[in-house]
Image (cartoon, rainbow, N blue to C red):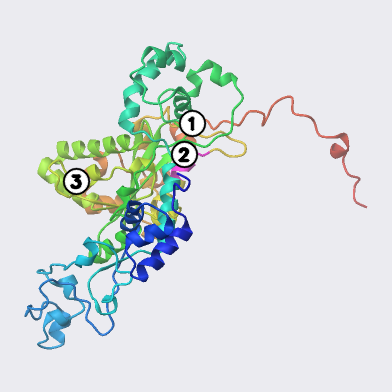
Amino acid sequence: MNKPRLTEEERLRIENGLRERRTPYAIAKALGRPVHTVVREIRARRVPSGKGAFGHVTNRCLLRKDCTRRRICAHCAYDGNRQCCFCRLCNERCGAFVEEKCPRLEASPWVCNGCPDERRCTLRKMYYLHAPAQKNYRDLLVESRTGANITEQELALFDSTLHDLTAKGQSVHAAMANNPGLFPVSEKTVYRYIAGGLLSTKNGDLPRKMALKPRKGKSVEHKVDTRCRLGRTYADYQLFLADNPGCPVTEMDTVEGTKGGKVLLTLQFMPWGFLLAFLLDRKCSAAVLDAFAAVRRRLAAAFGPEAARGLYRRLFRCILTDNGTEFSDPRPIETGRDGDPLARLFYCDPCKSWQKAHVERNHELIRLVLPKATAYTQATGFDTLTQPDVDLLLSHVNSYLRPSLGDATPLALFSREYGPELPALFGVKPVAPNDVWLKPALLGIDVRLKPGILDDDTPAAPASASTPLPPLP
């Protein structure tokens, strides 16, 4: 096709055609496009609108014409004996509400553009607007070209085999040639996954790879299914807190050591500031789900299945996290084995980590013991750590008093709410105030300088620079 994709100008012509009450067939004929292309565009990129009608109560209930209910909420009770169907809060607070849907939205043209009854209609509306449609198209196009287009299950099928063969000294090409039906991707793609840290095989396992000059390239990560954000955005999080005032929030994040190595899954329970962390072998959603499954097993073993369900619901009733690929499978975290809801997970807005500022602040305390790379020092990897090491670190972090908590410690406040048994169940023990240690030496970590910082062959300073200045008169 000469024009495989619709342009923004064509989308504007579709919008104007709909407002002029032209059929999708007439619009497609004017654009020189197939009719099904225009129909798919309208139905896929129409946007909902809650706009009402001037001078009319925005009541969308199917039963509103025959409804005689009164005093459903305090608003109607305050206004006297008024029928609730004439109240703007009827649809939100009436338990018998059944939304009436406009039949025009179920057939051509599938939108309210150009509808003669639009100005006096109170039903929920759908519009086709060229600007949001173009933005949706661009976002979808960019998303389809980013990330690794493979699932973690597909990676796991050949990851272990590839790791075993490369550990024996075989090349990636030999491993793929001897197992042709095991690899669903090309050889070049496997090398990209290795360089991006998605596989257990690392660049150090490939001798010739380490001898080559590093090339510039984009980092590789798993493709995130953005449908997981439906109903879980930061705006939904704020609505949930408005409907559940006083609900405790658990902020979740990950701390990365070196690229492709082990990571820490951190969970901070607010408002107590108590922090838990679990060492994960890989930064992926499967590892995060395994950590939550381990939490459930540990709670069930200590308190019994029924008590564990209630305690899990109290701890994780509302979870706030970022948009990392490791959190792209929220359903197993939110539900129990029988599918009943136990928690709600929400995502921050992209590039707005300050929306979960409390766990980010606690990461600074973790970095005092596990420092990042600087201009002079190397990054501290987590591959040599064990879960007892992480528990020891958290014992000191949670025993460190906070001015924001009235000079109390997160461990003391959390233990007052849930009892001292729960922190001890996860290996967090109290540390005396004067014994709190937030240095790399706590875990016996030796911070190493980068190569070339203190080399013996560093050129000496010029003689003129080392010549002492004459004394002042």
Q: Which residue is mark 1?
A: 445
Identity of the residue drawn at 50% across and 18% down: 206
Query: Where is residue 68 drawn, in percent x and y?
Result: 6, 80
Among the 4 quarters of the image, the one containing residue 149: top left
Give the label on residue 335, or none: 3
Query: Where is residue 299 drawn, in percent x and y?
Result: 19, 40
Q: What is the magenta segment's predominant secondary structure? A: helix
Q: Earlier in the sequence, mark 2 or mark 1?
A: 2
Q: Earlier in the sequence, mark 2 or mark 3?
A: 3
Give the label on residue 369, or none: 2
Where disc 2 sits, the SS reads helix
What is the magenta range? 365-372
Q: Quadrant of the N terminus?
A: top left
| Three-letter amino acid code of the residue under disc 1 | Ile
Instruction: State the separation of the CA atoms marked 2 and 3.
Output: 35 Å
Do we see residue 303 in this rendering?
yes
